[in-house]
Image: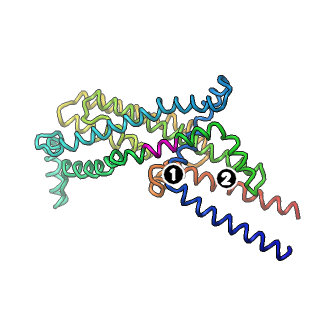
Amino acid sequence: MPASRKVELSFFFLLVAAATAVSFFIFKPYFGALFVAVVFAIVFRPLFETVHKRVKREGLASFLTLAFLFFVVLIPATLFGFFIFDDARNLYESAGNGASILSRLDEAILPFKEYIQKIIPGFEINISEYVDAALSFFLSNFGGVFTRAIGIVFQTFIMLLALFYLFRDGAKFRSYIVTLSPLTNEYDERILKRIESAISSVVKGKLLIILLQGILASVGFFIFGVPSPVLWGAITAIAALIPAVGVAIVFIPAVIFLFITGGMFSALGLLIFGMIIGSIDNLLGPVLFEKGLLMHPLFILLSVLGGIVFFGPVGFLAGPVALSLLLALLDIYPLLFQNNDNNQ
């Protein structure tokens, strides 16, 4: 290669690196919104295509799909968030009341605590204190969501705007990515399909299941008289991430609470209701989630939990997507070397 050509390429790649670095910092504040937009675009692509077949114009189809998601997904999710915050605030206020249900619960478990103290000297448990501390942490963090309302509204606007163009021009973006990749089109398509499968499986499978469990749990808590049902339903949805025992972590204490506060039939009803909700994951999970993702359940769980720790709430999806990308690359790895051996 001539020296002038090397200089030209070196200068070109230097410019590319510099432009990429600057673009990274420009788009960095919107990574979360853009990632959510990509997820929604993949999951609801079939809906967009159905609308597109009827209205023909891509721009109008994109707008109608976006309007549907805004009223059916975004607004209910926002209202649900307000209900959770209101329940948490009410429970926090009742925790400071000496006659609250939490104090009654402390009194009810006093005989058990005294018995354990005979076996383990110094053992202490104060439910009111623990719940008060947990709710204080929750309100201080979750409440910040509402104090940062302007920023959240702006990020939501960016997400919706990006989603509009991803619906309308998604095929063009996909073709452009394939064109830029140095891999063959076959490998590019395999990687993209693996990522799309991961996103669809996580959203349609795990996320949909835990949302269903959380909503049903809220209904059950309300019917059987558990205070702050929406809050505990949300906690149930989070706990449902833990396989097999997730829902039970919330339902068993709730059943015990109803039993020791005099609601024996309510406790029995909630126990049966909780067993039904817990079985939803076992019935639908293998069909909607693991089958589509082609990943061991242990890796799925670790990728979800690790993704949340590393990326924050977006990590619920980013974790499985990152792991799926790695697995797709590992699938392609031996094929690349096999092709190289055949070409030599």
Q: Quadrant of residue 82?
A: top left
Inspect the image, locate mark 1, and give the three-letter code of the amino acid beneath it: Tyr
Q: Earlier in the sequence, mark 1 or mark 2?
A: 1
Q: Give the Cα distance between marks 1 and 2.
A: 26 Å
Extent of the magenta region: 153-159
Q: Which mark is residue 30?
A: 1
Q: Quadrant of residue 14?
A: bottom right
* 247 vs 323: above or below: above
Q: Residues within 10 Å of mark 2 (few under 14, many from 20)?
A: some
Under circle 1, the secondary element is helix
Q: Position of residue 96 (x, y in %)?
A: 15, 46
Prevailing secondary structure of the magenta residues: helix
Q: Position of residue 288 (x, y in %)?
A: 56, 37
Q: Position of residue 304 (x, y in %)?
A: 49, 50
Q: Residue reaching furthest top?
A: 54
| Residue, disc 2 | 328
Inspect the image, locate mark 2, and give the three-letter code of the amino acid beneath it: Ala
Q: Quadrant of residue 63?
A: top right
